[in-house]
């Protein structure tokens, strides 16, 4: 089992962290955002669209348009970002035999541990804001490890 973001999720986090470092309300075109964040051109529209629909980005089309954060970075949770880009954080199959697990069937021996671990991960994502990620990225840059994705 792998617990990683999709490429889209990683690219989206990278783009949002960049926007979080700018003054609130600063608009950046999708093309500029993709270029600065080293996101392949074809992925940018989908990411921007999903983040906009989720109320994380505010986007204005046209010549003087662009994208900016819709809310303060401290008001955007990591869970919101992940779910906007990669879907709900749920595992619907039993860890042991692959059957569908809906918490109603007889529990396998791993079920209570999995439920507790999943909830701890969700709680961590809820309590970590985009502002927290941007602070960590700034610290990493000064330490020479600027990896955001």
Image (spheres, rainbow, N blue to C red):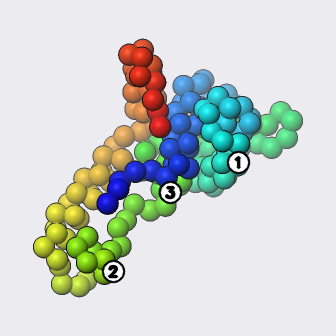
Structural distance between the alpha carbons of marks 3 and 2: 20 Å
User: Which of pointers 3 and 1 indicates the residue nearer the eye?
Assistant: 1
Residue 50 - label: none
Task: Find residue 28 and report its image quarter.
Answer: top right
Q: Mark 2 — residue?
A: 100
Q: In the rendered view, does 99 fall on the left or right side of 17?
A: left
| Residue placed under numbered mark 3 in the picture | 86
Q: Disc 3 or 1, which lies upstream in sequence?
A: 1
Q: Locate the N terminus by quadrant.
A: bottom left
The label number, if any, that marks residue 42 in the structure image: 1
Answer whether labels 3 and 2 touch (C-beta < 8 Å): no
Q: Nearer the viewer, mark 1 or mark 2?
A: 1
Q: From where the camera sits, is residue 102 visible?
A: no
Q: Secondary structure at mark 2?
A: loop
In the picture provided, is 85 more to the left or to the right than 120?
right
**Local crowd size for mark 1, using a 10 Å CA cut-off: few (<14), some (14–19), many (≥20):** few
The residue sitting at 45% across, 50% down in the picture is 5
Up-down relation of residue 40 to residue 37 (above or below)? below
- Cα separation between marks 3 and 1: 17 Å
Q: Would you say 111 lies left or right of 3 here? A: left
Q: Are marks 1 and 2 in contact (CB under 8 Å)?
A: no
């Amino acid at each position: 089992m792998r617990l990683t973001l999709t490429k889209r999720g990683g690219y989206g986090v990278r783009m949002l962290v960049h926007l979080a470092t700018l003054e609130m309300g600063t608009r950046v075109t999708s093309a500029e955002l993709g270029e600065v964040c080293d996101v392949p051109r074809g992925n940018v529209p989908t990411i921007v669209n999903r983040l906009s629909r989720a109320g994380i980005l505010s986007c204005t089309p046209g010549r003087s348009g662009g994208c900016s954060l819709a809310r303060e970075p401290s008001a955007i949770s990591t869970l919101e970002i992940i779910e906007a880009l990669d879907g709900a954080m749920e595992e619907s199959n039993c860890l042991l035999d692959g059957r569908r697990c809906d918490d109603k069937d007889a529990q396998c021996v791993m079920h209570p541990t999995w439920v507790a671990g999943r909830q701890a991960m969700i709680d961590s994502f809820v309590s970590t804001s985009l502002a927290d990620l941007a602070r960590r990225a700034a610290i990493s840059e000064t330490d020479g490890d600027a990896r955001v994705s």
